[in-house]
Structure formats: structure tokens, C-alpha cells
Amino acid sequence: MSSCLLGAIADDLTGATDLCNTLVREGMRTVQTTGIPPAGFSVPDTDAIVVALKSRTIPAAAAIDQSLAALAWLQSGGARRIFFKYCSTFDSTDAGNIGPVADALLDRLGGDLAIACPAFPETGRSVFQGHLFVGDMLLSDSPMRDHPLTPMRDPSLVRVLQRQTRHKVGMAAYADVEPGAAALAARLEALRKSGTRHVIVDAVSDAHLRSIGEACADLALVTGGSGVARGLPAAYRKRGLLAAHADAAALPRSQGLAAVLAGSCSAATLRQIASFAAGHPALQLKPTALAAGDAAVEEAIAWARARIAQGPVLVYASAAPDEVAAAQRSLGRERAAELVERALARVATALVDSGVGKLVVAGGETSGAVVNALDVKALRIGPQIDPGVPWTTSVGGRPLALALKSGNFGAEDFFAKALRQAP
Ligand code: ADP
């Protein structure tokens, strides 16, 4: 691996891409890997590497093991600053994994203080007096209250994180951040002296994120959402750690046909499907048909192959909530999801074998399944299509342009817009 400055560990795939997108926009050349690549895999010259794990909701001990392995790999590649990325809604339970992983990383790095800041005011996530807001709602009043895996019912991040660590959690509040980086740095130093190990940092504006970047650029470990990475690249450049690049988002030219695959059932994705299907061939896969055998997938592949030379096609399983609920009732939630993920992954590999070189995928889990099936070990991150979603190109093997979209991201015309802007 060539030497890079910043090594990041992300607790899920599309969250990793979101962080990469922020770093690239701030001028850092960035590569994302799917887990730790196999020995001998050659990572291209880059300023930042983001390892995407799938560790958000696994047992804490496993999340720690995976994160420490990622840390060791990043350090072997020269990473001198470490970032632990989690969701901007602080998705976690009292059993972890944010506190346990942050503690394990700090121990290994020999650090004595890390900040924790999921704020990204531009996307409606702000932290004030240690409390997290989603738009104008406290976290505990937002839909995150009823998340199936990580219900967030306490808006005080100081309390939430304190339940996940035996070390002292403190706060750098608005009054410490608003005056700028020097005041924040002084506050962090005072907290460090008083034995505080984790500091929830307020941020309600982009200027706050930039002050945080400047005040924290020398810390061994920063933890947070992708927003808090916004101020770091400029602070690294100021310290002479990072060279300026004319175009950190440059990607090699992609070749081949184009297709869109969707497995997300979010409201945003359903609107994007309706918009794209109005002007392009589109085919829906039904979980009950997939459960009956391989015929439905093979028919979908044949359908797509017959059309794709004339222009991009869309294959999707996404459905409205009542249709999803019906499929889950008859097949079980996990089996329905697994059938869909396997089917879309199979369609992806078949289409790439048929000459597709540009692929747009909607859905976090769906993207994970597709990337695994295509055996993509790493992605070079390119220009942003819509907030949080960049074009990427696979590294190693046959180059493939991929736009991986977490369900709720992107404007209504996202699919057509992404294909128009394909590298
Ligand atoms: P998002 O990013 O919106 O959360 P994901 O791809 O992560 O999207 O999750 C959507 C899940 O829903 C996937 O596991 C997918 O397999 C599943 N799914 C997609 N379509 C259906 C359907 N028609 N019925 C049941 N489950 C579905």
C-alpha cells in the first residue's frame, strides 16, 4: 500500500462512501475498501483510505476486533491520523458499538482524548448542549426513535455515550465552539487535564465544523459523522501534511453499457424509480416469484440483455410498504430481504458479464450485496452526484463505474442524472 495520511474506519458501507465524498470535496484523494483487502492487493496512491466495515449492529467484541484489524492495516499503509465514522444519528445501543470501538482505538493509539461529533448541519444534523437534533426535532422525537435495530430514545449524547464506556464523557458546548478553533482547543485541553476521555462537541453551523477540524487535526483519533471530516483536510494542508490537488475527484474514464438496480424501499428511492421508469425500460422482481426458484432471475437477466444495447435499463425489487409487508408476512423479513439481495447481485454480475460498465445501485444492504458479488475490493471516489453520493470506480480487476446510493439519498431524477454524469 502506498503511504496515506488519513485512515478511516466506517461502521457501514454507504456511510463509508458518504465520508469519502466529504473528503474528496475538501480536496483529499480518497479510496474506499470493502473490509480489509486481501494481502498483496495494491491500493493506488491516495491521501485517505476509508475501510468500510459492517459493524454497526454486530456484538461489541466483534466490532472491536474488526476495527482494530482495520486500524493495524491502515497503520501499515502509513496512516498517521485515524477517523472512526458512524451514523449522523449516532446509531447505537447501550451495549455499543460507538463507545467500545472508540475506547479500543484510543487504547491502541496510545491517545488520551477523542472527540465525538455526529453533526452535519447542512443535512439537518446539529448538536447543541450535547443534544442531537434531526432537523428541528430532538433525536428522541425523530423517526430514529423507532429504528428496528438501534432505537434512539435519549437525545443527550453525553448520556448515550457514557452508558457505552467506563471512561469519563464530557462536553465542549456551543460557547466553547462558537469563538473558534483556539477556544475549542483550550477547552479540549482543560477536559483532558481533568481526565475526560470522550468529548461530545457541539456544532450547529458549517463554521463550527471547520473550527473543529482545525482544533482536532493533531488528535490521533477523531470520531463522528461525515460532517466533522469537513474541516480536517484544510487543517492538514495548513500543517503541511497534505499537498493541494487540482482535482481530487478525477476518475478514469468508464466504458460499456449502463444499468440501474434498486433494492431500497425508501420513499426517495420509490420516487426515483417512478421517475426513471417513465422514460426507460423497467422490470420489477417480486420476492414471492424469487422464492419459487431461479427462473424469475434468469428471465430478468434475459429481459435486460435484450434491451440494454439500446440504452440503460432498470431492474428493481423495491415496493411500497404494504407490498413489502405482505412479502415479509409470507416469507419472513430476513428471507424476503435475502432473496432480493441475492437476485439483484446475480443480475449485477450477469449484466457486467454482458458488457455493463456503469452501474447505479440504490440501497445500503443492496449495494453491499452487489459489491460483494462483483468482488470489488476497493473504490476510487469521484465527483458528487447528489449530497452524500459520489461516482466511484472499482480498483483492481476490470474497471467498473459504480454509484452506490443509500436509500434516502438523492433527488427524484437521481438515476438519469447519475448516468448523464457517469465518468
Ligand atoms: P436502504 O438503504 O433504503 O435501507 P437497503 O438495500 O439497505 O435499502 O435495504 C432494503 C432491504 O429491503 C434489502 O434488504 C432488500 O433486500 C429488501 N427488499 C427490497 N425489496 C423488497 C420487497 N419487495 N420485499 C421485501 N424486502 C425487500
Image (cartoon, rainbow, N blue to C red):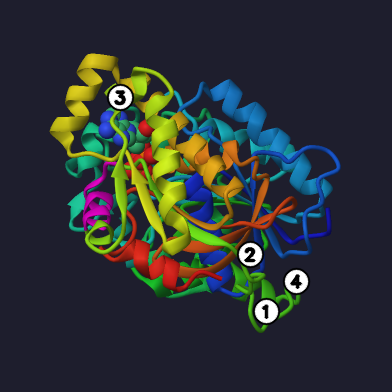
The disc placed on residue 397 is none
Report helix, strand or loop for mark 2.
Answer: loop
Direction from residue 16 to residue 175 in the image, left or right: left
- Cα separation between marks 3 and 1: 58 Å
Mark 2 or mark 3: whose residue is earlier in sequence? 2
User: At 28% from the left edge and 22% from the top edge, which residue is drawn?
Assistant: 288
Report helix, strand or loop for mark 4.
Answer: loop
- Cα separation between marks 3 and 4: 55 Å
What residue span does the magenta drawing correspond to?
A: 265-274
Mark 2 or mark 1: whose residue is earlier in sequence? 2
Chief SS of the magenta region: helix
Residue position marked by numbered label 2 in the rendering: 217
x and y percentages locating residue 67 in the rendered image: 64, 35
Of circles 3 and 1, the one toward us is 3
- Cα separation between marks 2 and 3: 53 Å
Residue position marked by numbered label 1 in the rendering: 238
